[in-house]
Image: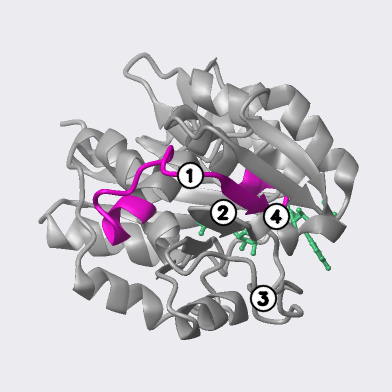
């Protein structure tokens, strides 16, 4: 009997990785859907990544997540990369195919868009201009997925202008790089404001941003999930703007990966949110 086919096995490779919420998330779903399996932490030093990935199939893994610092390096090591992940420049999910080959995906963009739709089911990317702050890894997923959903104008502002300009050049229209100093004015007329910088995260300074120009109906989203309500979201909520925090992105990006490994598209329930929030 081939035990490994009955026992679903997945995990997260990172270094360090002990802080990851992914085991709580996936093991919650394994239990909820009555599956037999486990999702484990896989602390893998950068130098060991090629050997670790090679071992996945032999160990009977259905696949794994990859997180910091492996997201870019792993993309070069898998056999096939999904086109969306290639455009994002990083993978966060690996699926071991039936023949043992590895396919790489990036579900962060899916997770981000889904988190907006969970909050506002009739949300549309083309509802008006969008301002995105930050041009790091999270911004790549957010900007690309917004552009793919039909955003007509994305104002991209980053502390280091060059990175915003590089991203605008790479992704093309509708992305336009704007100097960081103009961030307060860049909120005029927007339908959506997104923070993808680390400012406002626990241990960091709050984002330095005046919301005076922001329309009251604009949706304000922050990809940060610790704390659940960043100073930006608190200020937006107090002036009446609808808000979305980063937890929905974190939870939703995991759903397609779980489906690929365990065969069930899992749902995000209030119980799951409570289980994850209890780990913060
Ligand atoms: P990253 O690649 O290191 O990018 C960090 C960004 O923050 C850059 O744009 C950087 O600007 C900006 N920044 C740093 N210090 C700043 C300051 N003092 N003032 C203004 N901007 C500053 O990080 P990342 O992977 O994109 O992650 C960013 C945030 O997103 C983190 O809080 C992370 O936890 C969160 N995140 C959430 C999810 C989710 O599922 N919800 C997924 C991924 C990431 P420069 O280019 O000028 O340095």
The residue depicted at 61 percent of the width and 29 percent of the height is 174
For label 4, count other residues whose C-alpha is less than 10 Å away and answer few (under 14), some (14-19) or many (20+). Answer: many
Residue 108 seen in the figure: yes
For label 2, the SS is: loop
Tell me the number on the disc at residue 186: 4
The stretch in magenta equals 116-140
Q: Which residue is mark 3?
A: 200
| Secondary structure at numbered mark 3 | loop
Q: Residue under circle 2?
A: 189
Looking at the image, tell me whether mark 1 or mark 4 is earlier in sequence order: 1
Relative to 229, is 111 on the left or the right? left
Residue 24 falls in image quadrant: bottom left
Q: Picture quarter containing residue 162?
A: top right
Marks 2, 4: nearer the viewer = 2
- Give the Cα separation between the discs numbered 2 and 4: 8 Å
Query: Is disc 2 in contact with disc 1, using a CB cutoff of under 8 Å?
Result: yes
| Residue hosting label 1 | 128
Q: Residues within 10 Å of mark 1 (few under 14, many from 20)?
A: some
Q: Nearer the viewer, mark 2 or mark 3?
A: 2
Q: Is residue 67 visible?
A: no
Q: Reading the chain from its start, which is encountered first: label 2 or label 3?
A: 2
Residue 63, placed above or below residue 65: above
What distance separates the C-alpha of mark 1 from that of mark 4? 13 Å
Whether 247 is drawn above or below 156: the answer is below
């Amino acid at each position: 009997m081939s035990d490994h086919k009955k026992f679903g096995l997945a995990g997260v490779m990172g270094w360090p990785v002990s802080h990851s919420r992914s085991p709580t998330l996936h093991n919650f779903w394994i239990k909820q859907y009555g599956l037999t399996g486990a999702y484990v932490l896989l602390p893998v030093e950068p130098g060991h990544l090629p050997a670790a990935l090679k071992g996945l199939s032999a160990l009977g893994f259905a696949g794994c997540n990859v997180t910091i610092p492996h997201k870019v390096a792993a993309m070069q090591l898998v056999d096939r990369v999904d086109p969306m992940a290639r455009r994002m420049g990083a993978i966060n999910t690996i699926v071991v195919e039936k023949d043992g080959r590895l396919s790489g995906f990036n579900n962060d963009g899916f997770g981000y868009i889904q988190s907006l739709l969970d909050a506002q089911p009739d949300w549309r990317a083309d509802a008006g201009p969008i301002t995105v702050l930050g041009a790091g890894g999270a911004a790549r997923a957010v900007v690309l997925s917004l552009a793919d959903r039909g955003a007509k104008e994305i104002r991209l502002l980053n502390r280091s202008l060059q990175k915003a300009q590089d991203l605008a050049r790479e992704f093309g229209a509708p992305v336009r790089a704007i100097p960081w100093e103009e961030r307060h004015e860049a909120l005029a007329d927007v339908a959506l404001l997104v923070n993808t910088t680390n400012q406002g995260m626990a241990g960091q300074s709050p984002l330095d941003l005046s919301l005076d120009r922001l329309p009251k109906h604009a949706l304000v989203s922050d990809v940060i999930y610790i704390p659940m309500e960043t100073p930006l979201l608190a200020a937006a909520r107090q002036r009446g703007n609808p808000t979305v925090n980063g937890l929905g992105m974190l939870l939703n990006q995991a759903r397609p990966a779980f489906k690929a490994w365990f065969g069930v598209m899992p749902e995000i329930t209030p119980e799951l949110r409570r289980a994850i929030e209890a780990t913060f």
